[in-house]
Amino acid sequence: MDTPSPAALPQGIAFGPTTTDALGTGFRPFRFFAADGLVLAGRDYAPVRASDRRPVVCLPGLTRNCRDFEPLAARLVAPEESSPARRVVVFEFRGRGASQYDPDPARYNPLQELQDTLLGLALLGLDAITAFGTSRGGIVTLLSGLVAPGLVKAAVLNDIGTEIDIGGLMRIKGYVGKPLPEGATWDEVVAAMKIANREVFPALDEEGWRRFARRLHRDVGGLPKMDYDPALAATLAAVTPETPMPDLWAPFDALAAVPMQVLRGALSDLLTAETTAKMADRHPGLEVVEVADQGHAPLLEDAATLDAVVGFLDRVGA
């Protein structure tokens, strides 16, 4: 694919007509050109009533997409009267969801994803946000403290922290990029997900597994299809149990003055309780929420977790 020069790219956000997600919450889909010409996508959820609160900008995990945040968006844009409404903006990283796949898998990395996100925020006119990052999206959130100081005014990290446990990363490596069997049905995908993730989400019921499958896969002619570029697997190809994990303490320290909440799956194999405790020691006021019966990464749909997030956002103000 030929890469256009930055001067040749349209500068702006292209919005589609308002539509609704799987939960019936209205949003405007948008697209914009990355600096290298790739087409990137996202969703813009408007609050149901006037709001003076900062927008919440959601960044998904390695293989996840906008659909991951639908329950959270529903709570934030149309909360109970006692809680302020908020605008929610969700980005899909390159190679995921509705964003274009990158012909060079080397560009599937957090610094590139941060650059893409910063451009999207600039085009949307957003220079002060509350960031909500799941896993990979949380790494991008942390890096923003070094690259764009002052942008993130409050942050929620979903099962990610300053140290990554290699065991969890090896488990993720084991499934990323594995294609679905030809002609696999939704029932077959749900059954396979149960087997692969039963220790991660032991309390999930049948409907929960079906919701999870629908978030991770898109429907093409009635059949599920992987909703990310299989080439993402290349980013983990060199990872072994001996690979040193990235040290994210410096980005974390850059956000030391920022109100922060960490959601940790009680069964997480990526974010340990020890790492979370060290983060709390280093960041005065860090709020830690343990999500029962869930591993990496919590699904953000149970009432207790959503209540905790909304409560935190209400407390940290505008």
Image (cartoon, helix red, strand yellow):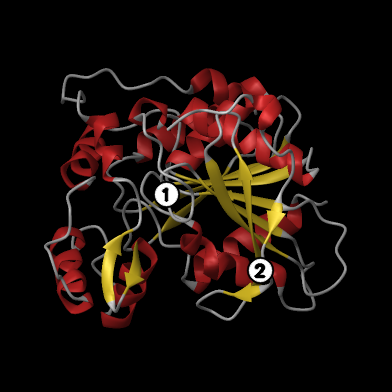
* Badge 2 amino acid: Phe
Q: How many marks?
A: 2
Q: Which of 302 and 150 is in front in this view?
A: 150
Is residue 280 in view from this perspective? no
Identify the residue shown where x is 63% and y is 71%. Answer: 75
* Badge 1 amino acid: Arg
Percent across and percent down for residue 64 are: 40, 53
When the figure is inspected, residue 17 is found, relative to residue 110, above or below; the finding is below
When the figure is inspected, residue 223 is found, relative to residue 177, above or below; the finding is below
Q: Do the residues labelled 2 and 1 touch (CB within 8 Å)?
A: no
- The image quadrant of residue 77 is bottom right
The earlier-in-sequence mark between 2 and 1 is 2
Helix, strand or loop at label 1? It is loop
Helix, strand or loop at label 2? It is strand
Horizontal side of 148 relative to 273 (left or right) equals right
Circle 1 is placed at which residue position? 96
User: Looking at the rendering, in which quadrant would you find the N terminus?
Assistant: top left
Circle 2 is placed at which residue position? 27
Identify the residue shown where x is 62% and y is 72%. Answer: 74
Q: Residues within 10 Å of mark 1 (few under 14, many from 20)?
A: many
Percent across and percent down for residue 112 are: 51, 28
When the figure is inspected, residue 92 is found, relative to residue 299, above or below; the finding is above
Identify the residue shown where x is 21% and y is 25%. Answer: 239
Identify the residue shown where x is 76% and y is 29%. Answer: 150
Which circle marks residue 85 in the picture?
A: none
Horizontal side of 229 relative to 140 (left or right) equals left
Q: Which of 91 and 139 is in front in this view?
A: 91
When the figure is inspected, residue 213 is found, relative to residue 174, above or below; the finding is below
